[in-house]
Image: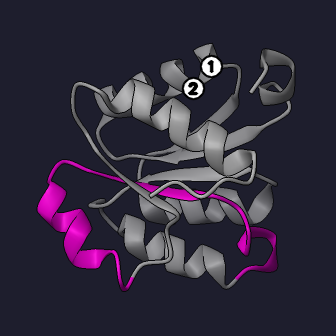
Amino acid sequence: MSGENSLEMKILIAEDDAAMRRFLEITLQRAGYKVMSAQDGLAALKIALSEKFDAVVADAVMPNLTGQDLCRMLRQNPAFTDAPLIILSGLEQELSANIEQDCADNYLVKGGELKEQLITALSNLLSGKMVN
């Protein structure tokens, strides 16, 4: 994805850990995306319903509304039927246990390669390619 195209893309981040939220904001901004963030799933849902976003990146475990619940609720909104939804988790087991029930497009484990994996996943999903 060229920097010109990604500048038009707006990403919503839902992450309760302030340091991780800031890391994700900086990572996506440096990749050329416009970014908004929320400190939990409920705040993210309120923001998502008030503005247009091209994709959502959500932590799996958050207060008030989990990443999985956020994804399920967003999928019920016509504006998010086809929008890429990515769930992040600290544990790979959490992700594999929920893959069948969730409506996220991609699952990433927080770790050393998260930056590269997130950029690649968003780029692929936003260009219409499914990444699993």
Q: Going by the image, does 72 lie left or right of 88?
A: right
| Identity, as a three-letter code, of the amino acid under mark 1 | Ala
Answer with the quarter of the image where residue 8 lies. Answer: top right
In the picture, the quarter occupied by the C terminus is bottom left
What segment carries the magenta color?
77-101
Residue 75, x across and y down, in percent: 63, 78
Residue 23 located left or right of residue 105:
left
Point 42% across, 34% down: residue: 117
Mark-to-mark CA distance, 1 and 2: 5 Å
Q: Amino acid at mark 2?
A: Leu
Q: Is residue 29 magenta?
A: no
Question: On the rendered structure, is 110 left or right of 108?
Answer: left
Q: Does dot 1 land on a helix, a strand or a loop?
A: loop
In the figure, is residue 120 to the left or right of 59?
right
- Label drawn at residue 74: none
- Asked if residue 98 is among those painted magenta in the image, a careful observer would answer yes
Q: Residue at x 26, y 61 (%)?
A: 61
Q: Secondary structure at mark 2?
A: helix
Answer few, some or many: residues within 10 Å of disc 1's Cα (few below 14, many 20 plus, some between 14 and 19). some
User: Badge 2: how crowded within 10 Å, few (<14), some, or many (20+)?
Assistant: many
Residue 95 visible in the displayed image: yes
Residue 60 screen position, x and y as percent: 31, 60
How many numbered badges does the structure rendering display? 2
Quarter of the figure that contains the N terminus: top right
Instruction: Please name the residue shown 59% across and 53% down the image.
Output: 56
Q: Residue at x 14, y 53 (%)?
A: 91
x, y percentage for residue 15? 39, 46
CB atoms of marks 1 and 2 within 8 Å: yes
Q: Quadrant of residue 50?
A: bottom right
The disc label shown at residue 28, or none: 2
Label 1 belongs to which residue? Answer: 31
